[in-house]
Amino acid sequence: MSISFGVHIGQQNLPMSELRALWRRLDDAGVDWISVWDHFYEAPPAGGTIDHFEAVATLGALAADTRHARLGCLVFCTAYRNPGLLAKAATTIDHISGGRFELGLGAGWHQWEAEAYGYDFPSAGARLDMLEEAVPLIRSLLTEARTTHTGRHFRTQNASCLPAPLQPRLPIWVGGTGERRTLRIAAEHADGWNAAYVSAERYGRLIGVLDDHCRSASRDPAAIRRSVNLIFALSNDGTSTEEVIARQGWGPMAAAVRDGAIVGSPDSAPEQIQRYIGSGAQGVNVALRAPWDDNVLDDYLEQLPVLRKLS
């Protein structure tokens, strides 16, 4: 299976006109994947002081503006939207994009935005219960003519989702690094699994856990595609990694994500990415957070032919 190289965009601290120009540029450059995240406030939290766009509407524009890259959200918080609404949104975006959309789902973590917007934010265990119930329910809505479901958190009554997605099986991803439950949910129900901002060594260990869960579920591990998001902390002027990450506004979270960054000069990116491919990654996405150096991004995109040889 070939390796995909993508870009994960945090749609904050930029006007929409610049975001649209960015993903057109990425699509023209030949990236395989473009995704956004699902937040109402900035991440990391800054008290709702930074401009930030909602994910579903953003994805509609992304789908209409691009032609080639696969598109996704890594990941939608299942506590924010009814599964039926997510299924309808996924189907609509799939049609706008001509069949390029992939739906990412997760348990969520941004308590501050949830409280600000009046959403319940239950315990991590309860949010994982919601995720575990939502994934197969959404799969049914996307593939079955009618879906009736009565669960602890969600229900549907003879629900249809028409038109169906353009793709016979619209891929569903589960995102997160929780070994006991998140990876088990991915193993049992997902088409893909994504982890963010972890070292290559930890990523390899998580893949081992995912494979164990697959075997316990009597599922072929090869049925699940695996990707990783990495902080884009490259520099071509000798700026330190710590300074690049600080400019991106990671604040107190900087230490936690530092191990999951590609650093140094752009021509060192292939060697760093190879370590993740060696650990089992089938997709590698650099995560852009404004501000970044456009010249460095150009230099990275020029490395795509070299990166493709890694696969």
Image (cartoon, rainbow, N blue to C red):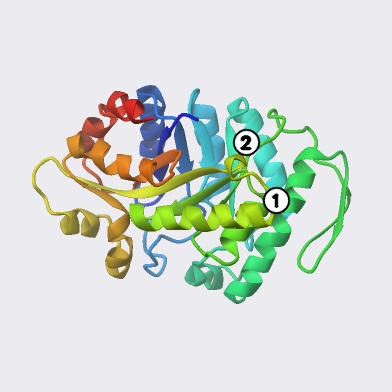
| Residue 175 in sight | no
Query: Could you say which quadrant of the image residue 21 lies in?
Result: top left
- Type of amino acid at the residue the image marks with label 1: Ser
| Residue 144 in sight | yes
Q: Is residue 213 left or right of residue 161?
A: left
Question: Residue 93 shows which numbered tag?
Answer: 2
Q: Earlier in the sequence, mark 2 or mark 1?
A: 2
At x 68%, y 51%, the residue is 189
* Mark 2 residue element: helix
Query: Could you say which quadrant of the image residue 180 lies in?
Result: bottom right
Query: Could you say which quadrant of the image residue 192 lies in?
Result: top right
At x 55%, y 55%, the residue is 210
Q: Is residue 96 left or right of residue 116?
A: right
Q: Which residue is mark 1?
A: 218
Q: How many marks on residues?
A: 2
Please state, as top left, top right, bottom left or bottom right, where the C terminus lies in the image.
top left
Q: Position of residue 143 (x, y in %)?
A: 78, 38
State which mark lies toward you, 2 or 1.
1
Q: Residue furthest left?
A: 238
- Type of amino acid at the residue the image marks with label 2: Ile
Q: Residues within 10 Å of mark 1 (few under 14, many from 20)?
A: few
Q: Position of residue 43 (x, y in %)?
A: 40, 61
Q: Quick check: marks 2 and 1 in contact, CB under 8 Å?
A: no
At x 62%, y 28%, the residue is 99
Q: Position of residue 92 (x, y in %)?
A: 67, 36
At x 11%, y 50%, the residue is 239
